[in-house]
Image (cartoon, grey):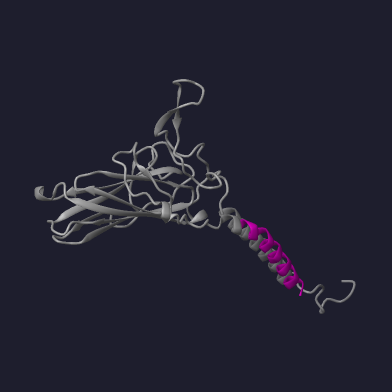
Amino acid sequence: MRITRVLGTALLALGLAAGPAAADSSPSPSASSDDAAPTRAGTSFRTATEIEQGQRATASGSTGDYLYWSFPADIGQRPTVKATVKLPDTHGPQTWQLDVYDGLRRRQSCQYGAATRTAAQGAASVELACVLRAVRGWSEPWADDPLPGTYYFRLTVVDLGAADLGQPVGAEVHVDSKDIGGAAAVDGSLGKPLVPGIAAKSKEGEGTSKAAVLSSFGSDDGWSSGWWSDRWVWTAIGGVLAALAGIGGYVLTRGSGRPSRVPPGA
């Protein structure tokens, strides 16, 4: 009974402590503002069209164009970029490629997914996908690990016949992410997210002075601070379970007192 009461009290206290943390770490619903979805793409990093995670964007272009979009990603997220290219009715074989870059314009490798695919002659469309590695809160200067901030992705054709160059195409892109939390958390934090200045504007009342304009989107409640993850919850659970195991082992091995075979006063 004593062990049962101890276990029940400890687990109740642990549940009350972990409840708010679990609620705080739950991913927020993805943006679904398809009504205001962009209908054009940029032609360079500086003119990349901004989209939110969960938002679908479309664009029209021609084979040979470079189409750019950008989106925000925070610590603990594993972004997935998908693109569908609608091809003309008649065309030869074409190879399309999806490239993803971070805020420092370093190309990020895909953890899995088909980022380069070839459409057969006469195919109506081709679908591309790139699942990035989980965004980290800290990295070595020499590494190219994904860090929180702005991400860019570029869609273009890399191989086609000369007769197909300049033909009209349509593109539909979508970005979402999975919050994997402490499974990919690392110690340390980034001072500021990688959100570079992408334009300049004149300050009000200061004539011709200009200031950098940062990306206009981001997390609704700000970027992650970098120190909290659900690893803290699991560490606390492990500590409590270890303590309970020690108490249980002591209770089971200490016995019921003086053995009956030992005479009194011995």
| Residue range highlighted in magenta | 1-21
Prevalent SS, magenta region: helix
Instruction: Tell which residue pokes out farthest to the bottom in this image.
Output: 261
Instruction: Residue 108 in the image: state x and y as whole percent.
Output: 34, 46
Image-based side of 34 in relation to 86, left or right? right
Drawn side of residue 262 relative to residue 244, left or right: right
Residue 230 placed where, x, y %? 56, 55
Depth check: give the residue in front, 157 or 186.
157
Camera-nearest residue between 159 and 68: 68
Left or right: 189, with 244 as reference point: left
Q: How many marks?
A: 0
Magenta residue check for 189? no
For image coordinates 55% across by 58% down, the residue present is 26
The single residue placed furthest to the left in the displayed view is 163
Asked whether residue 128 is in view, the answer is: yes
Residue 119, given in percent of the width and then of the height, sits at: 18, 58
Q: Is residue 225 left or right of residue 103?
A: right
Above or below, 193 against 131 in this view is above
The N terminus sits in image quarter: bottom right
Q: Residue at position x 89%, y 75% from top?
A: 264
Q: Name the quadrant containing residue 235.
A: bottom right
Quick check: can you spot residue 81? Answer: no
> In the image, what residue occupies the spot 76% across and 73% down?
255
Which quarter of the image is occupied by the C terminus?
A: bottom right
Quarter holding residue 80: bottom left
Does residue 5 belong to the magenta stretch?
Answer: yes
Rendering coords of residue 113 (x, y %): 31, 57
Viewer-closest of 108 and 218: 218
